[in-house]
Image (tube, coloured by chain):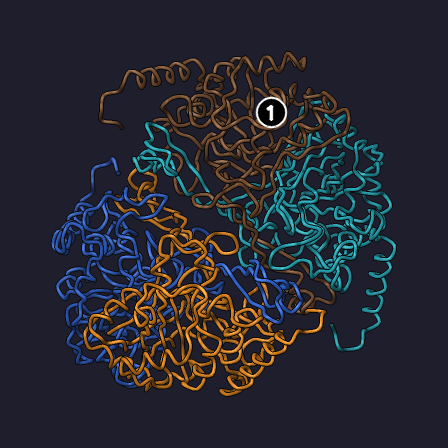
Chain colours: A cyan, B brown, C orange, D blue
Amino acid sequence: MTSTAPTREQTTDRQLLEHYIATCSNWGRWGDDDEIGTLNLVGAEQITRAAALVTQGKSFSLSLPYDQTGPQPGGFRSNPQLLVTASGSDHVSGAQDPLPGGFGPAQGFGFSDDVLVMPTQCGTQWDSLSHIFWEGRMYNGRSAGDVTSRGAAHNGIEHWTGRMVMPAVLIDIARHRGVVSLAPGEAIGPDEIDDYLQAHDVDLQPGSAILIRTGFMNERRGRWGDYAGGDAPGLSLHMAPWLHDREVAAIATDTWGVEVRPNEIGYFQPLHIVALVHGGLAFGEMFDLDALADDCADDGIVEVMLVASPLPLTGASGAPVSALALK
Amino acid sequence: MTSTAPTREQTTDRQLLEHYIATCSNWGRWGDDDEIGTLNLVGAEQITRAAALVTQGKSFSLSLPYDQTGPQPGGFRSNPQLLVTASGSDHVSGAQDPLPGGFGPAQGFGFSDDVLVMPTQCGTQWDSLSHIFWEGRMYNGRSAGDVTSRGAAHNGIEHWTGRMVMPAVLIDIARHRGVVSLAPGEAIGPDEIDDYLQAHDVDLQPGSAILIRTGFMNERRGRWGDYAGGDAPGLSLHMAPWLHDREVAAIATDTWGVEVRPNEIGYFQPLHIVALVHGGLAFGEMFDLDALADDCADDGIVEVMLVASPLPLTGASGAPVSALALK
Amino acid sequence: MTSTAPTREQTTDRQLLEHYIATCSNWGRWGDDDEIGTLNLVGAEQITRAAALVTQGKSFSLSLPYDQTGPQPGGFRSNPQLLVTASGSDHVSGAQDPLPGGFGPAQGFGFSDDVLVMPTQCGTQWDSLSHIFWEGRMYNGRSAGDVTSRGAAHNGIEHWTGRMVMPAVLIDIARHRGVVSLAPGEAIGPDEIDDYLQAHDVDLQPGSAILIRTGFMNERRGRWGDYAGGDAPGLSLHMAPWLHDREVAAIATDTWGVEVRPNEIGYFQPLHIVALVHGGLAFGEMFDLDALADDCADDGIVEVMLVASPLPLTGASGAPVSALALK
Amino acid sequence: MTSTAPTREQTTDRQLLEHYIATCSNWGRWGDDDEIGTLNLVGAEQITRAAALVTQGKSFSLSLPYDQTGPQPGGFRSNPQLLVTASGSDHVSGAQDPLPGGFGPAQGFGFSDDVLVMPTQCGTQWDSLSHIFWEGRMYNGRSAGDVTSRGAAHNGIEHWTGRMVMPAVLIDIARHRGVVSLAPGEAIGPDEIDDYLQAHDVDLQPGSAILIRTGFMNERRGRWGDYAGGDAPGLSLHMAPWLHDREVAAIATDTWGVEVRPNEIGYFQPLHIVALVHGGLAFGEMFDLDALADDCADDGIVEVMLVASPLPLTGASGAPVSALALK
């Protein structure tokens, strides 16, 4: 889409991107009709292995509150809004007598009700495999044109509902480096991940999730600024082969977009292009890993059962999730 | 609120309701500040016991799709609506170049985005302890006036996020009776539940959930009619002491309101008044238990790990949930 | 888009459609940048002429209430929903003390507030010139691709805001025929309009609006059924040349889609294709003409000042309007 | 609501407020059932007098665009959002074939559609007589409790639809003072208005509207900051008797709340309390008077026909409006 001849550097970037695409693609690997990508790596064995990690009876929520305190700065994506359609104030002021819906006199009964309005990508969420396109295609080679104003006819988030149960490893890079938070622009590469896993004596099995904590949510919590959409620490593009080779089923971070921003090459969100569009990898964003990380630092146990099934929003680009880590 | 003298039957209904309230109340049991009710019954022991039930690596989603095919007939509560704010059509037609948000030329990158609009009570959901009032009060004696147009200052659904992990028993009354579905108005009482548990050799422990299948969702699926809001099979009011004595932590059914409709006494949703408002019991509604029930009929195992943490919607009357049963 | 050879009748339909398009098009007539179509026909002269029609000081609202009693059956378009974000119940129950927004103690002050959610096409509204496409193009030859998930970059309804002031004639076909309502499928052609104008001694001037009453809203009011989207009486496709030659600036009817349904030829809404897409004519739909019509029957005066400026919804496919007829 | 004894100044403020309430109230003036307040002052005479002001055929829109560029800073009230449900991108990419709704093959036809989400008070709007309460009451003595989560059972904005047609005077205080804009906190009192009217040779008749331009919208346009909700120039509380005596039917300003902020006495929005709650006066807010003001400065004619009927949003606290000034 650029009319000028590519410079030497752009040529290199493009070649690099295409190399990663070629070597990390899972298109066709699980059949031409596949719509779940790396969740194919999670089966009965992974689920039972995950459950076996629950030995202490601890549960950690990994989801930010969905409300007006959320991280969005406004504009394209707003924070969740709860609109109350029946209130306790109505009840105590007598306005719910009779009850609506033909239910008759209230006789002491009252109720509240509300409507949720939220962008699916505004807080803690999984990207669906219909969220990102590359040159007119999404995961498994389907046309981006399958995602219209009516939603995604294929690769929608609903295909992952019921499936997000697997062993996961908390990879606390911030603590590993001894910092409160990595800085925007700081990338995390495969060597550092390997080093962390070795230090924590973790043998990462295929079909696992990795939960990568940069500390950036901790630093920005409540003073979000450009947290959601701005520069951020995150995964290097060069993680792509590692994620593919290790058969990672899902990745989640405490940042808005998983990968480091600004991007390392002259393409927007290249790790999404390689690992999500071509690899079919589940990307989880704005996961709140702080409470879990504190506990892992305390007991030294970084392997957990992740249960993080997205809401079955038919045809959606992503979905909010009440994600749990169980130990 | 009725100006005529109560009839003999009304007097009896009122006395019965007050008797159940008096004997089944948990107000103050877990402190005056408590906002989680029977979820206090679920601790580390229940979580590890639940995880130990996962031996086969099976996962069942108990949530209906959140979309326009949902059970609502329109009116007060609509079905979930997904509004697309960026589409693959835009991408393929070149309308996403440059990218919004100052992200520059698309160079092959594209994305979809969407906004969810849904009543929190329109599909599979947990009622919060701020959803129902009785004579100006909600669970633990708090004023209904705490629930305003800004949401619930207390007892909102967010207090249950991270906590809905426990052992659960699938109680398939429809199969137990040998019918496709119980009929509207048919009540389920404690003797039948006991009989079922005995037949399936289940020793129900405190802090467990029970998932009661009437078959009514199965019968109405896709031809909903008045499924959501009309007459329905369900729990008898007389389940209240049993639920209290057995220390049930949560109950979910495949109907819109857990309890039988029409109600058995002259008060609206009396089991909600007794068990939810006074008992602080978690009510799950419109849970899709059919696939799980088929599997339980196959392998004879009705005890599962329930993981059903509601979305953390601050101050909400309830929340959608991606509920899972793991075996 | 059909792969079979066209039948004789289809060929004729297509030829007819193309003939009307060729002879009734205003593309380029007011410059290549024009985005207002036939509103170019309304200038200072038309506005003053319209105002001169106001001799009795009567005002008639032509807009249906925007609320849940509206004509939509649900599905793709819902009826308007008002979501209350601050209520008098809150005020009387003391929940508005202190005031939000840092405004301090209420000291007796209270307020209500609300949010409107409505499809722009769900009730009384003007279609914009970006609402309908023909073979990839909209009015004045612009690409339909200019209308993306972000709205219409061109031809949006906002271009008509401030301009919908002109003389208008109430053409009450139902009364003219002596029926309560024309039946679905009954078409109104140019001869009948001419006959009506002659009978009422109206000399229709260029730059006027015509308000055509079929009686169908009257018949269906409150028992809408398929009123919005189903079969309906309306204008014949063969009105196209008449509308063009008479230089009509705007047309509005008491039906959902102006033109007769089922359509007279094998193309969907062919009058929209000819008169809106190619003619740039303003189409007003679901205008409530009943009260005005009663008055016109009483005093015999059918010429009015129309003031019906649409809400300036940037980039919208249409807009609700509080339309007035003044006499 | 304050438990301490009032200070001398507070006593004075309260006494002043009560004095104005007592002398400026219209409760009961037009009957106990009245829901339209000062719009009772507008009848056939005012409408014809207004129309007679249209001599040049000019039309000025007084409404801000309803879109994301609006004046709201986010939070309690957001800016209008247009959510596209069918796009030209869909059409050109072939995704609208067949048409939805059972309308069959597209055969070249295409369409766009969208949904509007907006707080009724977020932009140019009329406050309804159910928008503001004083000590549990709204206009004409009705209980604030009539405004529940379901909307206003009385005094909703729909009662003004069809009625906002009257003579109006543009009172350009900014130009009168020779400043770009009055500063926040600067009040406009009756003497200045009288001086302006005399200078422009205007004999203000009962049942007219006054359009007061402070210049503040002009100064803040596009760099809104705290324009909507913060300190602002505006009307003095001491305008209340003048507005009442002159029988003003409606007032609109280019600020968010008509009256000066910070308020002149220790009560929040006291002019609303006196003139809107007790006087039943129509308050129009965030009216864009700049283009009209330029024209009035050019031709010296400040009397116009105002046509500004609010959308008939049943039970709403206010409504957006496409307001026109015609000359």
Residue designated by label 1: B179
Q: Is residue C80 toward the left or the right of residue D59 in the image?
A: right
- The chain under label 1 reads B
Q: Quadrant of the N terminus of chain A?
A: bottom right
- Residue A150 horizontal/vertical position (percent): 60, 56
Which residue is found at the position 66% from the left and 73% from the top? C7
- Residue D24 horizontal/vertical position (percent): 14, 56
- Does residue D52 appear in this view? yes
Which residue is found at the position 69% from the left and 19% from the top? B49
* D67, above or below D56, in the image: above
C186 or B200, nearer to the observer:
C186
Q: Secondary structure at mark 1?
A: loop
Q: Amino acid at mark 1?
A: Val
Quarter of image, res C141: bottom right
Q: Quadrant of the C terminus of chain A?
A: top right
B84 or D239, nearer to the observer:
B84
- Residue C238 horizontal/vertical position (percent): 48, 79
Which residue is found at the position 34% from the left and 29% from the top? B136
- Residue D89 horizontal/vertical position (percent): 62, 67
Quarter of image, res D158: bottom left
Tag 1: Cα neighbours inside 10 Å, few (<14), some, or many (≥20)?
few
* D76, above or below C281, in the image: above
- Does residue C36 appear in this view? no
Q: Is residue A186 toward the left or the right of residue D70 in the image?
A: right
B256 or D211, nearer to the observer:
B256
Q: How many marks?
A: 1
